[in-house]
Each structure stands twice: as structure tokens, then as C-alpha cells.
Amino acid sequence: MAQTVAEKILQAHQIDDSQRVEPGNVIRARVDLVLLNDANGPVAFRHFANMGGKRVAIPDKVAMVCDHFAPAPSAAGARMLGDMRRFAREKGIEHFYDVGKGGIEHTLIPEVGLIGPGDLVAGGDSHTGTAGAFNAFGMGMSWSGMAAIMVLDETWFRVPESMRFHLHGKKAPYVTGKDVILHILQEIGVYGALYRSMEFGGPGIAEFNIDERMAICNMVVEAGAKTGIVEADDFTRSWAQATCKRPWKMVNADADAQYHSRHDLDLARMQPMVAKPYSPENVVPLDQVQGVHVDQVYMGNCANGTLTDLRQIASILKGRKIAAGTRAIIVPATQKIYMEAMAEGLIEQFVEAGAAVSTPTCGACFGGHNGALDDGEVGFATINRNFKGRGGHAGAQVFLGNSYVAAATAVAGEIIDPAKL
């Protein structure tokens, strides 16, 4: 039977063949990786103990990253990080990345080679679908579900329906992977892919490198999707050959695979998009929000703190200054990216422009620290959510967009088309 990418990956990880891998059926499967951070890990640890867990079934399948409350912004945050260190030490988790030794989980874990094409990845964070940029099936799960996998080395899945997004054409200047997913959210809304796999392919996908594919897959959950997966191509193969530390296998859908729906995206007709408060689906073309004053611009996060993003930011900031009355914060997603940006002179450019450069952290993305907004403030950010209270105070407003637009906005002090600079 012809299968989608999601169905093929689940088939390859199925424990037995008593149930057919087709939409709606429930199967038992083993994952390749369990991914926990300091916001969900400590809760999963309590579930693990309540289930009678003594030892982790396969410690090498578990990766733990300190990123949300790192560096610790408070005593409560320090306790969460302490719980991570204790569990890693007591259970023999070698893939543990503490403050200053890693970065943000969804960028870090593929960077260190623990995710590859064809993998099945379960994470306690809803943006685990970012793994789809690498032709893997990544999905967020309940914290009790994560604990159960650590105890049993298996879990269950309801096989999702799949949606096909066919990209073609050549993208215009200043259009990035962020604009692709914002365009889709404008079209289908936050419930448009509920418990489905969003699969991206077509000749247009080659317009986007691995970093920009992360931006696409990172936000599939904002459409309600279970996962998002980019079809494998030469970019995928080159990345995997250079990076993966475990066996991998590229996966593409059969030509006659059945999809819930098919969507055509002409990149030549696409332009930079912006999500207005207070929802990632409240998307409009950039020209409809130009002129809005911005108090703070936040550039970075798990999918938009990549070296590609930092280069895009630098191309706008070089020789310019952050506008008076506007703050700019730039967050490389991992320590390695930070070092690479330093070697290229990007960090120096950011500092000279008047931006604050942070150690890798999720802090301000969820309004926790290192850039939370005050009541009444307006922020522009490259993060993935802008619900009320997401960026700090519930009285703040957050606009979402790509790194070019964010950098231009920081220079102008108001939302602006980077082409105007």
C-alpha cells in the first residue's frame, strides 16, 4: 500500500504488525530519541517515580537539555535545573547538556548528531516537530507519556492523516522559511492541521537550506499538527553525512500516497509575512503593518537563532544602529552557533549596532527572562507564538516575522520592509 512519509517512519518503528499503519489506527512503536528540557523534564521525572521507575530502559535514547530556565533566573528556576542534573547523574544519562555546554534543544540535538533522517523522536516540548527539517518524525507528547517511554522503551501512536504542501518557484528577496509557515497559518489557521502530519516537498523546497527548513517545521504545531516533515533531498543527504552519529535512512512518500489534502505554494508570489497579536494565525502581508512602533525586537529562538538567521540579521545591521527608543536582543541558538558567529565577526557587528547579545536560552520566547516585555509594550520577535502573555506581561503585544524584517524593524524603530533600507 502506498504510504506518506509519516506512515513509512511509523511503519519502520512499529513493534509488531498486528495493526496496519494507516490513518486512525493505533500502533505500538519504539522511538529513537526521548528529548526533555528543564521545563518539562522535572515533571516527567515525578511521573517516572510514580510509575515505579527505577532505571531508564535505554539511557542512550534519552537527551536532556537545560534551556528554558538557563541560566537560572530565580531560585525556582535553579531548582528545575538542579532536578535535571540529579536525574542525569542518577540514571546515567550521558546526553545531558547543561548551561554553557549546549544551547536550545531543537537546534542543539540535531547539531550534535542525535537526530537523523527517518528517526522517530518524542519530546516533552510541543515544538519537537522541528526535527522534521531533517526528514525525521518529531512530536510533542505528554510528560507522563515521556516517563512511560523511559520506563518501557515503547509507546503508542494514532497514525495521523497527512497533508501535502507542494512548493515551487523561486523565492523573492527577504522571503524565508518563516514566511512559508506564516503563509500556511494564514491559509489554514491554528486548527487546520489538527493531529495531522504536514509534509513539505516539491522543487521549491530546494530554495531553503536546512536552517530555514527548521523555521518551517518548528511552527507546524501552531496549526495543530502532530508533526511536520520535509521530504529528503540532496540537502538532507549532505547534512546527514556530515553530522549524524547514528544510522539514518532518508524517507520520501510514494508517488501515489493518499493525503487528506494537497496545497500548492508558489514561492514567486510570496512576500514577507507578519503575525499580529494575539495568534500565529493572525497573519498579514508585511505592508499591512508597516509603521507600527516597536519597543523591543527579539531575534533568536530554537528555529530562528541559526547561523543563517544571524547572517540575515547582520546583513541588515552592518553599519547601522538600533533606533533610539527601541531595544534589540539577539540570541544564538547554540554555543557552537555563537562561536561561529564570533568567528565571522557577526557578534561584533551586533554589539556595535547597539544590540544585546545573549547566551543561548529560551528565556524571552516564553516570557520567562532575558527580555520579557512590560505592560503596554510592543515587541517584534522571530519566535513561534504571540498569544497574550507569551512574551511577558499579558498587556504586551508581540508581532512575529522573519529575521530580515526583525533586524530592519530594530533599525527603524517601527515595523518596516527591509527592502526600504
Image (cartoon, rainbow, N blue to C red):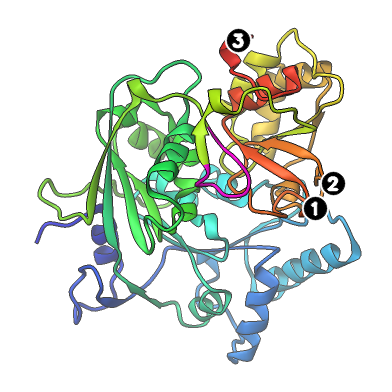
Q: Quadrant of residue 54?
A: bottom right
Question: Which image quarter holds the N terminus?
Answer: bottom left
Task: Judge whether residue 291 can be spotted in this image.
Answer: yes
Q: Amino acid at mark 3?
A: Lys
Q: Give percent across and percent down for residue 363.
A: 75, 49
Numbered-mark total:
3
Task: Judge whether residue 136 can be spotted in this image.
Answer: no
Distance from the alpha carbon under mark 2 to that under mark 3: 29 Å
Residue pointed to by mark 1 = 393
Residue 359 on the magenta segment: no
Residue pointed to by mark 3 = 420
Q: Quadrant of residue 41?
A: bottom right
Circle 3: element type: helix
Circle 1: element type: loop
Q: Amino acid at mark 2?
A: Asp
Residue 337, placed above or below residue 136: above
Q: Amino acid at mark 1?
A: His
Question: Which image quarter holds the C terminus?
Answer: top right
In the image, farthest residue toward the right: 75
Q: Give percent across and percent down for residue 135.
A: 36, 46
Residue 188, placed above or below residue 341: below
The span picked out in magenta is 274-282
Of 63 and 346, the residue lying toward us: 346
Of 29 and 280, the residue lying toward us: 280
